Image: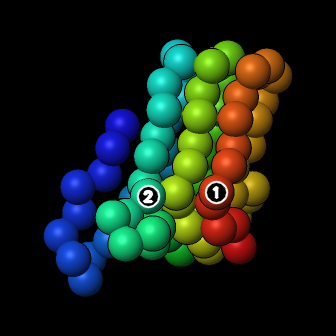
């Protein structure tokens, strides 16, 4: 999954918990100028920002904020790479 968000609007704000990442994939939110795609959980009532349940997942270039639970939760999966993100 690669983000193609318009300049000045680089944040996704879901209203419900996102589905688990249940198969190998790469999520890359790195912006061309070295910025981050945002994932704002302020409207999600509970749970993590991203829940990883599959091996072989890579998450990079995201600014994950304001979720009630963990920003990124690795739940029983091996071989997961979480790198170059901002969590808080």
Q: Is residue 21 left or right of residue 86?
A: left
* x then y, percent, for residue 82: 69, 43
Q: Residue at x 71, y 28 (%)?
A: 80
Indicate whether 37 appears above or below 26: below
Q: Is residue 19 left or right of residue 15?
A: right
Residue 8 percent coordinates (x, y):
25, 83
Quarter of the image with the N terminus in it: top left
Nearest to the observer: residue 1 or residue 65: 1
Residue 31 in percent (x, y) is at 37, 64
Give the SS element for disc 2: loop
Instruction: Determine the image quadrant of residue 13.
Output: bottom left
Which label is found at residue 21?
none
Asked whether residue 61 is in view, the answer is yes
Q: Is residue 54 above or below residue 51?
A: above
Q: Which residue is mark 1?
A: 84
Q: In the rendered image, which quarter is residue 73 located in?
A: top right
- Percent coordinates x, y for residue 49 in the rendering: 60, 53
Q: Which residue is mark 2?
A: 30
Q: Alpha-carbon neighbours of circle 1 within 10 Å: few (<14), some, or many (≥20)?
A: some
Residue at the location (71% across, 73% down)?
Answer: 88
Which residue: 64% across, 57% down?
A: 84
Q: Nearer the viewer, residue 71 or 84?
A: 84
Q: Is residue 72 left or right of residue 17?
A: right
């Amino acid at each position: 999954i690669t983000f193609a968000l318009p300049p000045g609007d680089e944040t996704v704000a879901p209203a419900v918990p996102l589905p688990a990442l249940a198969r190998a994939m790469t999520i890359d939110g790195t912006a061309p100028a070295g910025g981050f795609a945002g994932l704002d959980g302020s409207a999600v009532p509970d749970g993590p920002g991203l829940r990883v349940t599959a091996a072989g997942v890579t998450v990079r270039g995201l600014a994950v904020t304001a979720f009630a639970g963990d920003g990124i939760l690795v739940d029983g999966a091996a071989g997961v790479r979480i790198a170059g993100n901002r969590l808080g």
